[in-house]
């Protein structure tokens, strides 16, 4: 199972995510913010409050929204 170890806000709804195996890249989550739990994330200030939960090994927000690390790993766009 992939494990997220770092996340940084890049722009708009794009994050730079690094996994424990060294894979790192950008993920644009704009199209994934559907549903009640993701509604607050549409506010960029709130979206920027993303952090890594070391117990879940993925990214989370204060309202409990998260994305499965497997989902993130499959959609990462590796950039230099």
Image (cartoon, grey):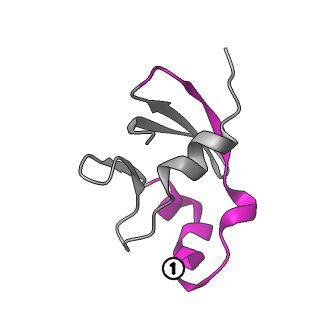
Residue in the image at 46% along x and 63% along y:
66
Quarter occupied by the C terminus = top right
Residue 6 on the magenta span: no
Apparent side of residue 47 relative to residue 64 in the rendered image (left or right)? right
Looking at the image, the residue that sits furthest to the front is 1
Residue 56, image x and y in percent?
31, 54
Residue 33 on the magenta span: yes
> How many discs appear?
1
- Residue 15 lies, with reference to residue 46, above or below; the image says above
Residue 49, image x and y in percent?
41, 55
> Residues in magenta?
21-48
Residue in the image at 55% along x and 25% along y:
24
Can you identify the residue that label 1 sits on? Answer: 37
- Residue 70 lies, with reference to residue 31, above or below; the image says above
Looking at the image, the residue that sits furthest to the top is 80
Quarter occupied by the N terminus = top left
Give the camera-side residue of 10 and 80: 80
Residue in the image at 51% along x and 35% along y:
17
Looking at the image, the residue that sits furthest to the right is 31
The quarter holding residue 3 reads top left
Looking at the image, the residue that sits furthest to the bottom is 36
Crowding at label 1, few (<14), some or many (≥20) Cα neighbours within 10 Å?
few
Residue 38, image x and y in percent?
56, 74
């Amino acid at each position: 199972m992939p494990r997220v170890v770092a996340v940084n806000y890049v722009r708009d709804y794009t994050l730079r995510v690094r996994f424990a195996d060294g894979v790192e890249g950008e993920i644009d989550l704009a199209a994934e913010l559907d549903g009640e739990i993701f509604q607050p994330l549409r506010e960029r200030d709130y979206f920027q409050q993303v952090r890594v939960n070391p117990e879940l090994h993925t990214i989370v927000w204060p309202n409990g929204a998260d994305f499965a690390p497997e989902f993130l790993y499959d959609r990462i766009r590796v950039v230099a």
